[in-house]
Amino acid sequence: MVALPGGVNGKILRRALPDQFKANWMVKLDIMSDPICPWCYIGKAQLDRALEKNLNHPFEIEWHPFQLNPDMPAEGMDRRAYLEGKFGGKEGAVKAYMPVGEHAKAAGLDLNLEGITRTPNTLDAHRLIHWGGIEGRQTAIVSSLFRAYFQEGRDIGNREVLADIADACGMDASVVMRLMHSDADVDEIRNRDAAAREMGVTSVPTFIVDRKHAVPGAQSAELWTKVIEELGQQA
């Protein structure tokens, strides 16, 4: 473990991020995430609160794929069946999600967990995030995916839903749909997911500061503010 700015206890990655993760502008903040992970949504909300209060923050943010359920059927599965299978029944699922609601509320999020009917395979959602990054719309896409899934109960494994999200974020929905019906960047996403695991990432969200220090979990806005302040002092 290492001490990061703001008193965060992070861990050194097994090896440095490969070239596709690197940037030369300011301080890189790489985020491994899955759009069906509630803690990823909570972690983003807390980070956003810190960034809104510190508009001169040094971070250049890039989102990276990490599938919680890489073996999920392409069509997804019933949400209740998935949760009860994962957590050992209804009571286990309810107990597991109790902290989610509490932390979401603290982060200013109003989740509609009852509105979620399916757990999707997120491969296509990660492809959309990747394409959004190429067009400079990555964070907007990530935000829209979280909102669509956790607040609107939309199936973000459905390609028409993904094309609609792309359109709302200023991307060409027809191009996105055409790409979705091909194998474009499927290997790219799977390889980047595998690379993250090889570097030592085991859960999401995982935030990687300056390409070296991994900070797992949904951190508070206050902690990120301290990190930003101390990075500013080191500049």
Image (cartoon, rainbow, N blue to C red):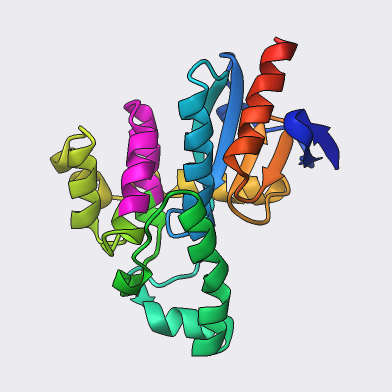
Residue closest to the eye, 21 or 225: 225
Q: Residue furthest top?
A: 235
Q: Give the magenta range.
A: 126-147
Quadrant of the image occupied by residue 134: top left
Query: In the figure, is residue 28 to the left or right of 144?
Result: right
Depth check, front residue: 10 or 166: 10
Q: Which image quadrant is residue 87 in?
A: bottom right
Residue 216 placed where, x, y %?
A: 67, 48
- Quarter containing the C terminus: top right
Q: Quadrant of residue 73?
A: bottom left
Q: Is residue 23 visible?
A: yes
Residue 163 image position (x, y, % from top left)? 20, 48
- Taking the spot 49% from the left edge, 69% from the top edge, the residue there is 71
Q: Position of residue 213 (x, y in %)?
A: 74, 35
State the predominant SS element of the stretch in magenta. Answer: helix
Residue placed most toward the observer, 79 or 235: 235
